Amino acid sequence: MPIFLNENGQGLVGFTSASSWAASYMAILMVMAVVLAGNVARQRKPKRIGIGDGGDHTLLRSMRVHGNFVENVPFALAALVMLPLLGAPVWAVHVVGVSIVLGRILHAIGLNGSAGASAGRVSGMILTWLSLLFSAALLLWLAWR
């Protein structure tokens, strides 16, 4: 029995283009999460730091890049699941997907390069926040239109 039914009570067959693109962006974000976590693990082993940062500022920055990623990306993942289910157009999924992926890449590069403010870090956070705000507004509009 189909889980999702359309307006006529018929089961939805297959994925829409929006669903396929959303899944693709989600996969990219999952790979990015593993790469960022691996970067932290790679630094821990030779320094023999199992917990915390051991006072190592490079490790701390890598931990914060990963931490900031996992603090923000779950909301985008939730939006990428819900947008196609609510009938969002494919362009909207691209706006969310591209902006969150690009934002997270820019943030990671910016913060890995410098602990202070940098163009990559600031532009990455702005893109991330804009993606989340756009997603929130669009989800509300689609849910209650």
Image (cartoon, rainbow, N blue to C red):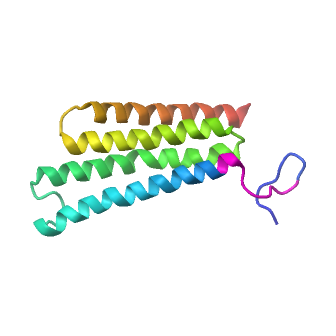
- In the picture, measured across the screen, residue 129 lies left or right of residue 140, that is left
Magenta portion: prevailing SS class? loop
Q: Is residue 70 above or below residue 91?
A: below
Name the residue rendered at 86%, 45% in the picture. 7
Using the rendered view, name the quadrant where residue 112 is placed: top left
Along the viewing direction, whichever of 73 and 15 lies nearer the viewer: 15
Along the viewing direction, whichever of 39 and 81 lies nearer the viewer: 39
Can the viewer see residue 21? yes
- In the picture, measured across the screen, residue 81 lies left or right of residue 28, that is right
Tell which residue pokes out farthest to the left in this image: 55
From the top left corner, tell me how far across and down residue 56 is, in percent: 10, 54
Q: Quadrant of the C terminus?
A: top right
Q: Quadrant of the N terminus?
A: bottom right
Q: Is residue 3 above or below residue 126?
A: below
Q: Which residues are magenta?
A: 10-19
Name the residue rendered at 38%, 43% in the picture. 104
Using the rendered view, name the quadrant where residue 39 is placed: bottom left
**Is residue 16 shown in magenta?**
yes
Name the residue rendered at 54%, 38% in the picture. 96
From the top left corner, tell me how far across and down residue 54 is, in percent: 11, 59
Along the viewing direction, whichever of 123 and 11 lies nearer the viewer: 123
Tally of numbered tags: 0
- In the picture, measured across the screen, residue 28 lies left or right of residue 16, that is left
**Is residue 23 shown in magenta?**
no
From the top left corner, tell me how far across and down residue 44 is, in percent: 18, 64
Can the viewer see residue 139? no
